[in-house]
Structure formats: structure tokens, C-alpha cells
């Protein structure tokens, strides 16, 4: 396993495209396959295959015009044609800043890294989760 600047750049590209509200750019970063999975913070935010591209992107970016993500410092790794990354990102709204965690898995196809799994969520302590 080795550090992968290319995988780190893929994470940054997703954040930038989401911030810009560029659904075409976001969609181009993902493998088009039923195995592709994107998980967000909300209980209903679990998308597989084309559902992420067709529903989530159209709903969230179409409605909001972009999501104000700010990257932290992504760390990406790769072994052969499989890569993964993790980052602590932030949503920056005018009245509120929300820290989030982001992880992803990518595969290299024809020399291009593409996402097959992405997870972005807010950290909640065990105590808060159990207190419900």
C-alpha cells in the first residue's frame, strides 16, 4: 500500500464539483455500476447504482445549486487498482459550520480513478446516540 495523490485528488474533485453544483462533473467521478454505493448522513440517504446519480444529485444539487463543502486534508492510499481515502470535511453555511467525516473507495479503470463507494456523515458520540 502506498500513499496516492491521485486518489486524494479524486476526493477533492468530488468536493469541488458538489460545491459548484456541477451534476455532470460529479456523475463522471463514479463507476456506473449497480455496486456503486453512496451513503449520506440521513437515514434515507443510502443510494446504490444509478439511484445516486439520478435521484440524489438531481434532488440536492438541483434544489440547492451546490453544497458548501470545504475539504480538510484528505489522505488517500492505493494497492494496485484499488484506492481509498478519508477526510474530515466541513459544510460551511453563513450561520453554521458542520464538521463531517468522509470516506471513499475507488477503482482505477483505463488509468482513471473512479468512485465505487462514498460515505459522508456527522460524528455523533455513543452517549448522544444511545440517549436518542
Image (cartoon, rainbow, N blue to C red):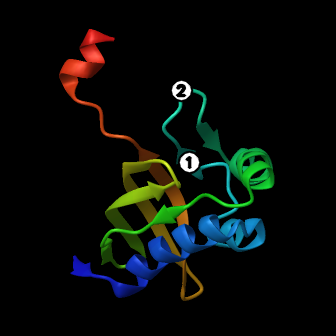
- Residue placed at 77% from the left, 70% from the top? 24
Q: Residue at x 80, y 54 (%)?
A: 62
Q: On residue 43, which mark appears? A: 2
Q: Tell me which residue sits at (38%, 77%) in the image.
A: 8
Bin the neighbour count of mark 1 within 10 Å (Cα to Cα): few under 14, some 14-19, many 20 and up. Answer: many
Residue 84 vs residue 106: left or right? left
Vertical position of residue 101 compared to residue 68: above or below: above
**Which labelled disc corresponds to residue 48?**
none
Between 60 and 36, which is closer to the camera in this rendering? Answer: 60
- Residue 89 location in percent, x, y? 38, 60
Q: Which residue is mark 1?
A: 38
Residue 19 on image: x %, y %: 60, 66
Q: Secondary structure at mark 2?
A: loop
| Residue 97 visible, this angle | yes
How packed mark 2 is, by other alpha carbons closer than 10 Å (few <14, some 14-19, many 20 or more), is few
Relative to 20, say whether 88 is above or below. above
Q: Which secondary structure, mark 1?
A: strand
Amino acid at each position: 500500500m502506498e500513499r496516492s495523490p491521485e486518489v486524494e485528488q479524486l476526493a477533492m474533485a468530488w468536493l469541488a464539483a458538489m460545491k459548484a453544483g456541477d451534476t455532470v462533473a460529479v456523475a463522471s467521478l463514479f463507476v456506473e455500476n449497480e455496486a456503486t454505493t453512496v451513503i449520506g448522513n440521513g437515514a434515507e440517504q443510502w443510494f446504490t447504482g444509478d439511484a445516486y446519480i439520478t435521484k440524489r444529485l438531481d434532488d440536492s444539487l438541483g434544489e440547492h445549486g451546490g453544497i458548501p463543502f470545504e475539504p480538510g486534508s484528505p489522505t488517500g492510499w492505493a494497492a494496485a487498482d484499488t484506492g481509498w481515502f478519508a477526510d474530515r470535511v466541513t459544510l460551511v453555511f453563513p450561520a453554521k459550520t458542520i464538521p463531517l467525516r468522509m470516506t471513499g473507495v475507488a477503482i482505477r479503470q483505463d488509468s482513471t480513478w473512479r468512485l465505487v463507494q462514498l460515505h459522508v456523515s456527522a460524528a455523533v458520540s455513543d452517549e448522544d446516540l444511545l440517549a436518542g
